[in-house]
Amino acid sequence: MRRKVRGKYYKSNTKREKEGQAGHSMALFPFCKTPTGPVRVTRIQLVLYCFLLSLIIYFLYGREAAAGVKPSHPIFNAMGKDRGGVITDMMVVKAAVPQTPVETPWGAPLVWGDTRNSAWRRAKLSQHGIRTGLLVLMVGTYSHFMRRFLSSAETHFLPGQMVTYYILTDSPHSLDPPVKLGPERELKVVPIAELPGWERLAYRRMALVSDAIRDQIGSEVEYVFCADIDQEFVAPVGEEILGDLVATLHPELYGMPRNTFPYEIEEASSACVDDDEGDYYYTSELYGGLVSEMYRMSRACSMLIFQDQANGVVARGLEESYLNRYLIDHRPTCVLSPEYSWWDSALAADVPVQRLVSLGRQCESYDKQTREERRC
């Protein structure tokens, strides 16, 4: 476009600017030519090129990361999901989750042992004479874990407090010679009928706990905690764990999306959990509370288990499925972090301190020789 100014013609500023932009583009991209002339690269094209390059890099890196992920815990096999895909998704979610939240969505404390709140609770409760029971089942081959469990509990479980160990066992003679206990600590044996097979034990455990609390424990202690015997205390577990109803977060599912929790999904089961239910997934390795609350929970769970057994229904997580169902309907007043139930696993949460370690779960990943060396 030309316009006349004082008898002369000049190119308009608009055309000059366009020619300047074209020249600038050619200076940046001298190689962008075709037989018919130079190719003009617009800003939109540059943005698109960068976006496409970023996508290519992202997908190439994502494939390499997925290929390097280790297989998951067997719990995910029961979920019927592809292990690689599940792990990759969950690892991404984990990175975005705060490591030490100190409260649940409903306002209960989420306990980490070294926080200021835990220190305050220990200082406050240590001034009171509280008697607590620690109940374990020792049946069959699990008897060889007993001495390690008791020795570690003597060192780390509620040090300085009055503790009674209740050993529900079908082989009382395996406790000879007795483990030497400290002051204000005692051990009581509760004989039970022989229960061969893990599944049978898992189905009977809640009923055995309920009966023991009703017949003996309820009149002797204020709090009682149930723990799997194939564990070892490796750091202090103090008064910060005490509460009306206490549950422990599953270390491999802490921080994971809700759809990865292995809740019972069969509608015929009394342990069934709907898609819109559940805040956390809790482990059956350690749980407890006031004896009245523990009796109420263990009795309710045992009745549901027997009801399903009569109908030929088997929950996918056995006892743990019913525990989680109950804790959805009756939210715990105190939730213990994965510090209080941990084992070495590719999916286990990173915790500041490991306090109670599951030897049994850890041994599942060892070969035969390693199991023998570590007395699994």
Image (cartoon, rainbow, N blue to C red):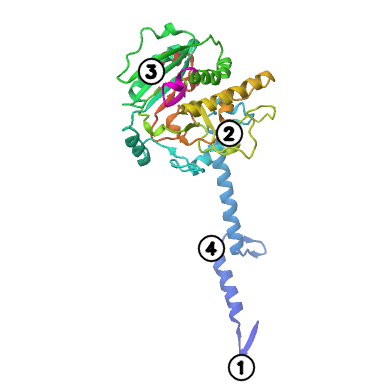
- The amino acid type of the residue labelled 2 equals Phe
Judging depth in this view, the residue of 308 and 130 nearest the camera is 130
Q: Which residue is mark 1?
A: 7
Badge 2: how crowded within 10 Å, few (<14), some, or many (20+)?
Answer: many
Q: Earlier in the sequence, mark 4 or mark 1?
A: 1
Residue 324 is covered by the magenta coloring: no
Please report the bounds of the magenta region as a residue range: 215-227
Q: Position of residue 34 (x, y in %)?
A: 65, 61
> Looking at the rendered structure, which numbered label has been put on residue 261?
2
**Residue visible at 64% across and 65% down?**
37
User: Which image quarter holds the N terminus?
Assistant: bottom right
Q: Quadrant of residue 66?
A: top right
Look at the numbered disc 4 and give the secondary structure of its residue: helix
Q: Position of residue 52 (x, y in %)?
A: 60, 52
Q: In 3D space, how far apart are the residues under numbered discs 3 and 2 (Cα atoms)?
A: 32 Å
Of circles 2 and 1, which is in front?
2
Q: In 3D space, how far apart are the residues under numbered discs 2 and 1 (Cα atoms)?
A: 84 Å
Q: Position of residue 294 (x, y in %)?
A: 50, 27
- The amino acid type of the residue labelled 3 equals Leu
Q: Which residue is mark 3?
A: 150
Of circles 4 and 3, which is in front?
3
- The amino acid type of the residue labelled 4 equals Leu
Q: Position of residue 375 (x, y in %)?
A: 42, 14
